Image: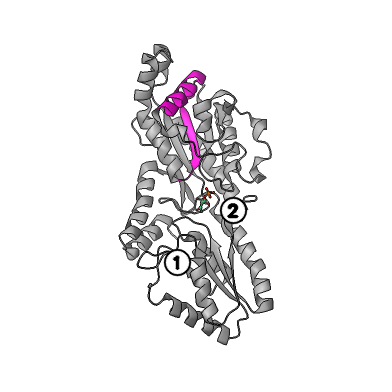
């Protein structure tokens, strides 16, 4: 029987529990023995109870759970070879040679590196007597499958990441709340949203909440003129009778000289306009709570596909990442997706904002 472990890694996102549930149950359905790897890569490094079998009933009710019930962590030990040697040994001792990782690009890259290093790790483990020659012979190839759990929607080659729509929903609820008090007092609010280097959450929140103005990293405004432009737009809206002003700022917002556009600076520009202005940084509330229906569906369908991909993987095929393109669940090469994601960041670094926007647009198919 094939043994497959599932792990969540990096920042949590809504829908991760649904993903784990789907992987465990699909695995059992396809005749596999399933393991949960707890606390991200720490579960591999430490083994013991942190790398243990999970049964059908263990994930009962997980569809509607927030966060990740198998835990997540940034594991420093796994960045060292000694940690990865422990990880390989713990897997081999349990007969696990396939790992499904749900996380962001960093976590998925780590998994792919682990796979390419696997032969040399096993050779060293055998040489030092930590595994037998038979075990070495039996588990020569490590299968890795990536699922993307991230509120930021910041991965190329997939339209959506698990958690992005739940986070967007949370942001919309919060902005709706803020809007009521803003309108009562005729105030302006600068709402800072997450997204690391990706403006998807900010941009979509701007559309969904009817914000006056949005700042995203992929389309940075002119450093010299953005204040005047912001003021002109907001004044125009006020003159048309709007009693509130809502500006959404992505946490990674920058201007075209690559200076950060901070919520405080945006506030100052609005204060200059004579508006009574407050800043609200939404923070981790955006990663909290349960997954919306879309994320539950995405996580479930992708979880099933991840198990199929693990069962069909061969040593010669690159590690797959499970994505969604035009409403179809797809397998794409994991490292190609990571490469294209990094290309956006590179384009921004090179101040090639047009390219950054086009790359992101193509990557998300929005
Ligand atoms: O990647 C998800 C994310 O929530 C980003 O939007 C944010 O920049 C970051 O994680 C926050 O990380 P932490 O929870 O470690 O503060």
Q: Are marks 1 and 2 in contact (CB under 8 Å)?
A: no
Rendered location of residue 49, percent (x, y): 60, 25
* Nearer-the-camera pick, 159 or 266: 266
- The segment highlighted magenta reads 82-104
Residue for badge 1: 261
Q: Is residue 257 above or below residue 125?
A: below
| Residue 111 is a magenta residue | no
Mark 1 lies on a secondary structure that is loop
Measured along the vertical axis of the image, is residue 189 above or below residue 95?
A: below
Q: Picture coordinates of residue 358 (x, y %)?
A: 36, 62
Is residue 97 shown to the viewer in this render?
no
113 and 146: which is toward the camera? 113
The reply, left or right, for residue 105 in relation to residue 64 is left
Classify 2 as above or below 210: above
Mark 1 to mark 2 CA distance (whole Å)? 20 Å
Residue located beneath label 2 in the image: 284
Q: Residue at x 46, y 32 (%)?
A: 77
| Above or below, 14 relative to 235 | above
- Toward the bottom, the furthest residue is 239
Evaluate whether residue 13 shows in this view. Answer: yes
Q: Is residue 250 left or right of residue 354?
A: right
């Amino acid at each position: 029987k094939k043994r497959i472990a599932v792990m969540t890694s990096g920042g949590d996102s809504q829908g991760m529990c649904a993903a784990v549930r789907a992987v465990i149950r699909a695995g059992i359905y396809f005749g596999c023995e399933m393991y949960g790897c707890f606390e991200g890569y720490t579960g591999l490094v430490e083994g013991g109870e942190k790398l243990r079998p999970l049964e059908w009933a263990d994930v009962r009710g997980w569809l509607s759970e927030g966060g990740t019930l198998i835990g997540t962590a940034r594991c420093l030990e796994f960045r060292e070879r000694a940690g990865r040697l422990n990880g390989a040994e713990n897997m081999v001792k349990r007969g696990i040679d396939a790992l499904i990782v749900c996380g962001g690009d960093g976590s998925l890259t780590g998994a792919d590196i682990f796979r390419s290093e696997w032969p040399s790790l096993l050779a060293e483990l055998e040489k030092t007597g930590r595994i037998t020659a038979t075990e070495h012979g039996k588990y020569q190839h490590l299968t890795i499958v990536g699922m993307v759990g991230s509120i930021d929607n910041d991965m190329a080659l997939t339209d959506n990441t698990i958690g992005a729509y739940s986070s967007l929903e949370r942001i919309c609820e919060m902005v709706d709340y803020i809007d009521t008090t803003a309108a009562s007092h005729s105030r302006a609010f600068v709402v800072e949203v997450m997204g690391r280097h990706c403006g998807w959450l900010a941009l979509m929140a701007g559309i969904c909440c009817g914000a006056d103005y949005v700042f995203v990293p992929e389309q940075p405004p002119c450093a010299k003129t953005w204040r005047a432009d912001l003021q002109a737009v907001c004044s125009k809206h006020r003159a048309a009778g709007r009693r509130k002003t809502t500006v959404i700022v992505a946490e990674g917002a920058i201007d075209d000289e690559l200076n950060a556009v901070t919520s405080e600076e945006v506030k100052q520009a609005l204060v200059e306009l004579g508006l009574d202005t407050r800043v609200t940084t939404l923070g981790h509330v955006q990663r909290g709570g349960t997954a919306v229906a879309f994320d539950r569906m995405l996580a479930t369908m992708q979880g099933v596909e991840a198990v199929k991909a693990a069962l069909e993987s061969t040593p010669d095929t690159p590690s797959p990442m499970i994505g969604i393109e035009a409403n179809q669940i797809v397998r794409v090469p994991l490292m190609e997706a990571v490469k294209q994601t990094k290309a956006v960041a590179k384009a921004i670094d090179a101040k090639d904002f047009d390219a950054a926007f086009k790359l992101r647009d193509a990557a998300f198919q929005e």
